Amino acid sequence: MSDPRGEVVAFPGGGGDPSLVGAIEALLFAAGAPVPVARLLEVLPGRERREVQGALEALGRRYQAPESGLSLEEIAGGWQLRTDARFAEAVGALMGGKTQRLSKAALEVLAIAAYRQPVTRKEIEDLRGVASGAVVRSLLERGLLRVGSRRDEPGRPLEYRTTALFLELFSLGELRDLPTLRERRELD
Amino acid sequence: MSGAWTIHTQVFDGPLDLLLYLVQKKGLNPRELSMVEIADSYLAYLARMTELHLGLAADYLVMASTLIWLKSLELLPRKPALVEEEDPAEALADQLIAYQEVKAQAAALDALPRLGREQHRREAMEEGEGPLVSPVDAFGLLELYYAMLQRHAEPPPTHQVHGPMPTLEDACREVIGLLDLSGGSAELGWMLRELGAQRERVLGFLGVLEMTRLRWLSLEQRVHLGPVQVSLNLDGDPDYGLLSGAVEEEIA
């Protein structure tokens, strides 16, 4: 059996050591949260990064099958099993319909923090033209923003940054994956 | 064009939001605004909002005064400026364009597949690793609080001298000071006792709750009804403004 590049595929069904693919699936299922490759290597002694990467690719391919209800995503610097967006409605109903709601104001503050971080509260308020302390506070409580260091300017204001939870919520691998405005325009 | 049947469901997040809406509705370029036109439609909108008894935040009135001033600059002849000054209309256009970009980025974020909306994850397993560090339950805190009040009930005072009333911010500073002294972590009961009079202790307790909510502190209780350990999560001083920051004024 060979793949399109003509390389011999060691195992039928998409490559990768089947026991390693299975082990990684079990780990990601149990974890729920995104697991970095480094962490997978810690709990899989004797395995090499290259093998684990190959197994992740094989696992990802398996979830691309139409009968698969899960997908493997690279999120917040790790790998995470998620339900496929096609089944969002049914899964949402099962979970009691409590979807993650974010107000327009919260989205704006997150956008300012995400694209321009680190930002101070004053910078957020200057951009939005409206007091934003309450929104910043609720985003801190929800763990979507965090306090960075103090800026070296008069008043020594605190700087805010987005968190790993922010990346997880918006399905981003890292901050560089934030959509650019050009991409956005092309979508419209 | 006015009619009693005109219904606007649009809710604005502040004056810039409203202004941007008006600019976009008229299909105008923020760089080439006629201040006369935009100031008039902004004021007309404010008047309508007042009619509908929507509370107007002060920010809207500040913007109204800015627009009226800009309108006057546009209408009245100006002495040529001796020094090259920034054009105030230009500054407003910059603000509008920057805010337009923020809104576009917020829309781009909103369009991303969202966890809990398009996709779901498996929730964390119940069992933890190592010693169970569970979040302190409300009753544990309450019991501690009553025990503290009773243990240190002060004898009825013969004179009451009221000093300046300490604020929540003062109490939070005290708590953080105590935590700093104890190397970032201390037992809650001990800390409250250190705070002195009953009033300070009550405020200190509220401060601990508030700062925990803001995730500046974390609480840990290893045994049910056991001592509660408070630890500092911050480097440097926190933004005390968030403690008592006025609730965002929004037109709802």
Image (cartoon, grey):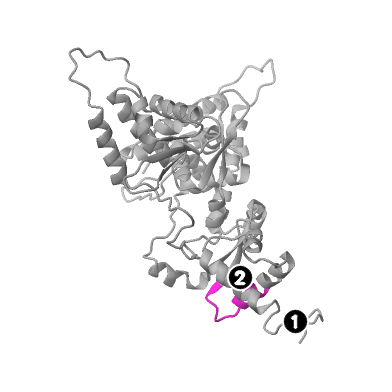
Amino acid type at mark 1: Ala
Residue A131 lies, in percent from the top left, at: 46, 35
Question: Which residues, given as a range, are shown in magenta?
Answer: A58-70
Task: Please identify the quarter of the rendering in which residue A153 is found.
Answer: top right
Please give the name of the residue rendered at 57% of the width and 33% of the height, measured from the top-left corner: B92
Instruction: Name the chain under label 1.
Output: A
Q: Is residue B174 above or below residue B159?
A: below
Disc 2 and disc 1 on one polypeptide chain: yes
Amino acid type at mark 2: Ile
Residue nearest the viewer, comparing A21 with A179: A21
Q: Considering the numbered disc 2 on the image, is that residue within a helix, a strand or a loop?
A: helix
Q: Quadrant of the C terminus of chain B?
A: top left
Please give the name of the residue rendered at 40% of the width and 30% of the height, measured from the top-left corner: B58
Task: Please identify the quarter of the rendering in which residue B142 is found.
Answer: top left
Task: Please identify the quarter of the rendering in which residue A7 is found.
Answer: bottom right
Left or right: residue A89 versus residue A59 is left
Q: Which residue is mark 1?
A: A10
- Residue A116 in view of the camera: yes
Residue B42 lies, in percent from the top left, at: 45, 37
